[in-house]
Image (cartoon, helix red, strand yellow):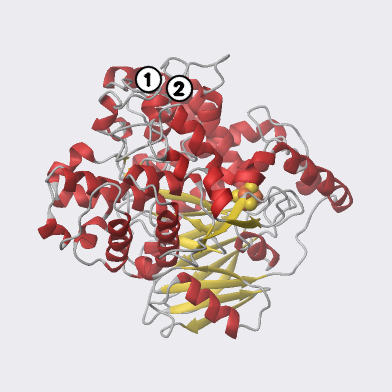
Amino acid sequence: MIKGFNGKILLIDLYNRTFKEEILSEDKIIKYLGGRGLAAEYYRQLIGKDIDPLSDKNKLIFMTGILTGIRVPSSTKFSCATKSPETGHYLCSNSGGLFGPYLKKAGYDGLIIEGKRGKPLYLIINDGRVTFIDAEDYWGLKVSDFESEIKKTSDIKNPSIMSIGPGAENGVVFSSIQVDGRSFGRAGAGAVMGSKLLKGIVTYGSKEIPVANMGKIKTKFKELSKKARESKISMTRYGTLQNLEVINALGFLPTRNFQDGVFEDASKIDAETMKKNYFIKNGACYNCSIACEQNCEVKEGKYKGTKIDPEYETVGLLGANCGISNFAAIMKANKLCDDYSLDTMSTGGIIALAMELYEGGIIDNSDTEGIQLNFGNDDALIEVIHKIAKKEGIGAILSQGMRGIIKAIPEAKKYAVHVKGLPLAAYDPRGVHGMGLTYGTSSRGACHNVGGYTISTELDSNKYDRFAFKGKGKLVKKLQDVRAYLDSTGVCTQARTVLGFTDNPEEVVLKDITGYDFSSTLMEIGARIYSLERMILVREGITRKDDYLPPRMEEPLGGKGASAGHAITKKNYDLMLDEYYREREWDENGIPTAECLSNLKINQP
Ligand code: SF4
């Protein structure tokens, strides 16, 4: 057996309240490595194309990466695959926290949850023992309250807690699963968990994970952790929020529902402001020396006592994109989203859309029950988040996500900034065109990570012109493949270069851990995962027609910033898309060809 894994998957049946173990075959590991790759393969086998995401037919598939939980820097990540209620098709997501490492140390490489029956419950997985516990008294609790209750009553010291809040219980289609302060944020895995009446999973593991050469790994860990820390000093100092100032200066910070690329109050919500007025200390995921989390607290005013770790995407979308310049209010909105288990990014994108509809007179006070939903109104932002989680008033429509809003208010289509139902991340692609293709071809709608994060590469002006279209198909494909195999290792992207996980992978630790030489096949594994995910999407009805950007991206970007006036017309987008499909060996309709499937050894479904 390839080391790094236990060779076992835990299958939980919530209908019968039973569990069993299944062997994880070496074959699957060689083809898909772990995490995201394995999750996609299990999804293809287990989740039918026509099922309703919130029915008992849907499953939650969690897979650890081959390095998750092992003494390697930032080896914290694990993946989730399920059918998304937000987009209506395949969802893959990735989270840090302690859960992945503990699940593996409990003896399981993955966890598949199916069925639904009766009353709310939560699960305990403790070193191989699985217990089903009644959670009726906990149903309706916010995530932080549930975590406190479990910590108060559990016999397990410092367990990992993965759970949902009332937003997910109520079926908000963009609700998240919260995991030890991190989350499976995008595309609504939380609502799937809520539909199964599963409040949470408490996990602890203390077993040794099999490793091929433990001596070498122990020696290397210190040195690699030091290198990782030294290579990411600014991440430790400012976290991801450091991006905000740069992206605003370059003119592609989404502002007021992507109407502008420059937020005039950016200095009130940037990393320096966070550091000066709110920062308390750094926090870190499992085995991570970078510690990019910025633990912050509001020290005065009406949001006093709010504690949260602000991230760039959240501040960009709940802040600038909603015209909000009150950092304390953004922190409060972030905290509410986490407690209700709502994706902060979709919440920001959707409230920004509602604000534009309100200012344009498409919805009015009679729709909002008197809430003045103007850009910049932080009280309205907070109030609407409560309404979304409870599905009350305007929140009942907004809780259905972009697809549901357009169905209810057809005029919204023109202003809705999403791909395949998923709101865009906090980078306007009119200022960095490769990101347009990233959003269009990502396996889960407009995601900046899964789709291949081109920003740093495109801003290297010696090699790339951020406003060019040619060459972006090749670039996006390459970055997507790196990301797909990286998400299958279980290592955080911040530590990837010190571990040699680039587009030209180097052997640094993988062979010492697994006993198998993967390095020459990693890019092929990434490409295989990406085309496998595309085959799943094609099975669910996705083709070229779904890979386009929203209408707003065809209009010149407004304002006077460094990207103002730029647009991505259909003609130029088609140039990128055609190049991309060619690079992937997909046909002109975006369907993997027989040659592609044979080259990547993907079995025809
Ligand atoms: S760099 Fe940040 S997100 Fe990545 S593992 Fe470390 S603390 Fe977690």
Residue at horizontal 46 percent and vertical 45 percent from the top: 269
* Pick the front one: 5 or 464: 464
In this rendered view, identify the residue nearer to me: 327 or 601.
327
Q: Quadrant of the C terminus?
A: top left
Question: Mark 1 and mark 2: span between their CA atoms?
Answer: 8 Å
279 up-or-down from 557: above or below: below
Residue at image location 50% in from the left, 83% down from the top: 133
Q: Nearer the viewer, residue 80 or 159?
A: 159
Q: Residue at x 54, y 48 (%)?
A: 36
- Image coords of residue 171 (percent x, y): 31, 65
Can residue 29 be seen in the rendering of this structure?
A: no
* In this view, 587 is above or below 468: below
Tell whether 201 sits left or right of 211. left
Q: Residue 405's x, y, as percent? A: 21, 51
In front of the other: 565 or 599: 565
Which residue is tagged 1? 578
Q: Quadrant of residue 332?
A: bottom left
Mark drawn on residue 473: 2
Dot 2: what SS? helix
Q: Position of residue 321 (x, y in %)?
A: 35, 43
Q: Are marks 1 and 2 in contact (CB under 8 Å)?
A: yes
